[in-house]
Amino acid sequence: MGLGISRDRVAPRTPLRCPVCAGDLDGVMIRDLGGVTANLVWEMHAGRCPEHGWFQAEVISRPPREIFPVDRPFGATRRLVIDGQEVFAFPTVWNNLPLAEKRKRSPDPLDAAYWRAEPPTGVAMGNGVGRR
Protein backbone atom coordinates (compact mmCIF):
# COMPACT_ATOMS: atom_id res chain seq x y z
CA MET A 1 0.00 0.00 0.00
CA GLY A 2 1.66 3.22 -1.20
CA LEU A 3 1.38 6.67 0.26
CA GLY A 4 -1.15 8.83 -1.57
CA ILE A 5 0.21 12.30 -2.17
CA SER A 6 -2.37 14.68 -3.57
CA ARG A 7 -1.32 17.34 -6.05
CA ASP A 8 -4.65 19.14 -5.67
CA ARG A 9 -5.97 21.27 -2.84
CA VAL A 10 -9.74 21.66 -2.76
CA ALA A 11 -11.41 24.81 -1.37
CA PRO A 12 -8.15 26.68 -0.65
CA ARG A 13 -7.85 30.44 -0.47
CA THR A 14 -6.75 32.08 -3.72
CA PRO A 15 -6.57 35.62 -5.08
CA LEU A 16 -8.21 34.39 -8.31
CA ARG A 17 -11.53 36.15 -9.03
CA CYS A 18 -13.87 36.07 -12.01
CA PRO A 19 -12.21 38.28 -14.63
CA VAL A 20 -15.61 39.26 -16.04
CA CYS A 21 -17.47 40.41 -12.90
CA ALA A 22 -14.65 40.37 -10.27
CA GLY A 23 -16.79 38.08 -8.09
CA ASP A 24 -15.65 35.29 -5.81
CA LEU A 25 -15.31 31.82 -7.33
CA ASP A 26 -16.85 28.53 -6.21
CA GLY A 27 -15.22 25.10 -6.40
CA VAL A 28 -11.74 26.58 -6.05
CA MET A 29 -8.86 24.17 -6.57
CA ILE A 30 -5.09 24.61 -6.65
CA ARG A 31 -2.90 22.06 -8.39
CA ASP A 32 0.78 21.85 -7.46
CA LEU A 33 2.61 21.46 -10.76
CA GLY A 34 5.93 20.82 -9.05
CA GLY A 35 9.04 22.91 -9.01
CA VAL A 36 11.42 23.10 -11.93
CA THR A 37 14.11 24.29 -9.55
CA ALA A 38 14.32 24.57 -5.79
CA ASN A 39 12.19 27.26 -4.14
CA LEU A 40 10.03 27.77 -7.23
CA VAL A 41 6.27 28.04 -6.64
CA TRP A 42 4.50 26.49 -9.66
CA GLU A 43 0.74 26.14 -9.29
CA MET A 44 -2.47 26.25 -11.30
CA HIS A 45 -5.41 28.01 -9.62
CA ALA A 46 -8.94 27.27 -10.88
CA GLY A 47 -12.44 28.26 -9.83
CA ARG A 48 -15.99 28.66 -11.16
CA CYS A 49 -18.05 31.82 -11.37
CA PRO A 50 -21.74 30.90 -11.09
CA GLU A 51 -22.53 33.31 -13.95
CA HIS A 52 -19.44 33.13 -16.21
CA GLY A 53 -18.04 29.59 -15.78
CA TRP A 54 -14.59 28.20 -15.01
CA PHE A 55 -11.36 30.22 -15.02
CA GLN A 56 -7.74 29.38 -14.24
CA ALA A 57 -4.35 31.06 -13.88
CA GLU A 58 -0.80 29.69 -13.69
CA VAL A 59 1.59 30.91 -11.00
CA ILE A 60 5.33 30.42 -11.50
CA SER A 61 6.96 32.29 -8.59
CA ARG A 62 5.31 35.52 -9.73
CA PRO A 63 1.69 36.61 -10.11
CA PRO A 64 -0.05 35.27 -13.22
CA ARG A 65 0.16 37.16 -16.51
CA GLU A 66 -3.28 36.04 -17.69
CA ILE A 67 -6.50 34.45 -16.51
CA PHE A 68 -8.07 31.97 -18.92
CA PRO A 69 -11.69 30.85 -19.35
CA VAL A 70 -11.60 27.04 -19.34
CA ASP A 71 -14.06 24.18 -19.86
CA ARG A 72 -13.27 22.57 -16.47
CA PRO A 73 -10.62 22.85 -13.74
CA PHE A 74 -7.18 22.41 -15.32
CA GLY A 75 -8.89 21.95 -18.69
CA ALA A 76 -8.68 23.48 -22.15
CA THR A 77 -9.27 27.14 -22.88
CA ARG A 78 -12.84 27.85 -23.91
CA ARG A 79 -14.35 30.50 -26.13
CA LEU A 80 -16.01 33.36 -24.27
CA VAL A 81 -17.85 36.19 -26.06
CA ILE A 82 -18.14 39.59 -24.37
CA ASP A 83 -19.72 42.57 -26.11
CA GLY A 84 -19.55 40.63 -29.38
CA GLN A 85 -15.79 40.00 -29.06
CA GLU A 86 -14.15 36.60 -28.53
CA VAL A 87 -11.97 36.51 -25.43
CA PHE A 88 -9.53 33.69 -24.76
CA ALA A 89 -7.51 35.36 -21.98
CA PHE A 90 -7.70 38.30 -19.59
CA PRO A 91 -4.42 40.14 -18.89
CA THR A 92 -3.67 40.89 -15.25
CA VAL A 93 -2.28 44.00 -13.61
CA TRP A 94 1.03 42.13 -13.31
CA ASN A 95 1.11 41.45 -17.07
CA ASN A 96 0.54 45.11 -17.90
CA LEU A 97 3.26 46.56 -15.66
CA PRO A 98 6.19 47.99 -17.61
CA LEU A 99 9.10 45.53 -17.87
CA ALA A 100 11.43 47.84 -15.93
CA GLU A 101 8.88 47.90 -13.09
CA LYS A 102 8.62 44.09 -13.04
CA ARG A 103 12.39 43.67 -12.94
CA LYS A 104 12.80 45.77 -9.81
CA ARG A 105 10.03 43.96 -7.91
CA SER A 106 9.98 40.58 -6.23
CA PRO A 107 6.29 40.38 -5.42
CA ASP A 108 4.48 37.80 -3.40
CA PRO A 109 3.04 35.57 -6.15
CA LEU A 110 -0.27 35.51 -4.24
CA ASP A 111 -0.61 39.30 -3.84
CA ALA A 112 -4.21 39.92 -4.97
CA ALA A 113 -3.37 43.41 -6.29
CA TYR A 114 -1.41 41.87 -9.16
CA TRP A 115 -4.12 39.26 -9.96
CA ARG A 116 -6.79 41.82 -10.90
CA ALA A 117 -8.00 41.28 -14.45
CA GLU A 118 -7.89 44.11 -16.93
CA PRO A 119 -10.11 44.32 -20.01
CA PRO A 120 -8.70 42.47 -23.01
CA THR A 121 -7.63 44.68 -25.93
CA GLY A 122 -10.63 45.83 -27.92
CA VAL A 123 -13.24 44.75 -25.37
CA ALA A 124 -15.21 47.47 -23.58
CA MET A 125 -16.24 46.17 -20.17
CA GLY A 126 -18.15 48.39 -17.77
CA ASN A 127 -18.78 45.66 -15.22
CA GLY A 128 -16.06 46.09 -12.64
CA VAL A 129 -13.17 44.29 -14.33
CA GLY A 130 -9.92 45.67 -13.00
CA ARG A 131 -11.69 47.38 -10.11
CA ARG A 132 -11.54 45.13 -7.08
Image (cartoon, rainbow, N blue to C red):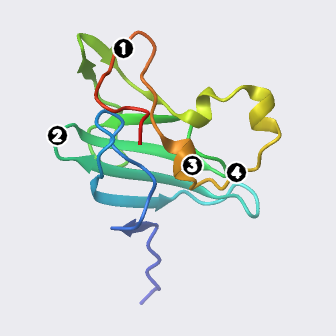
Describe the element under mark 1 as helix, strand or loop: loop
Sequence-wise first label, 3 or 4: 3
Describe the element under mark 3 as helix, strand or loop: strand
- Nearer to us of marks 1 and 3 is 1
Residue 131 location, quadrant: top left
Q: Nearer the viewer, residue 30 or 126?
A: 126
Q: Which mark is residue 38?
A: none
Residue 42 percent across, percent down from the top left: 60, 55
Q: Which mark is residue 123?
A: 1
Instruction: Name the residue type under label 2.
Output: Glu
38 horizontally vs 126: left or right = right
Instruction: Name the residue type under label 4.
Output: Pro
79 horizontally vs 114: left or right = left
Q: Residue at x 34, y 68 (%)?
A: 10
- Nearer to us of marks 3 and 4 is 4
Instruction: Name the residue type under label 1.
Output: Val
Residue 39 percent across, percent down from the top left: 74, 63
Q: Residue at x 24, y 14 (%)?
A: 83
**Tag 3–tag 4 contact (CB < 8 Å):** no
- What separation in Å lies between label 3 and label 4 (alpha carbons)? 12 Å
Residue 94 percent across, percent down from the top left: 61, 36
Instruction: Name the residue type under label 3.
Output: Val
129 horizontally vs 60: left or right = left
**Tag 1–tag 4 contact (CB < 8 Å):** no
Task: Tell me the residue that label 3 is attached to.
Answer: 59
Q: Nearer the viewer, residue 25 or 124?
A: 124
Pointer 4 local density, CA inside 10 Å: few below 14, some 14–19, many at least 20: few
- What separation in Å lies between label 1 and label 4 (alpha carbons)? 28 Å
- What separation in Å lies between label 3 and label 2 (alpha carbons)? 24 Å
Sequence-wise first label, 1 or 2: 2
Task: Tell me the residue that label 2 is attached to.
Answer: 51
Sequence-wise first label, 1 or 3: 3
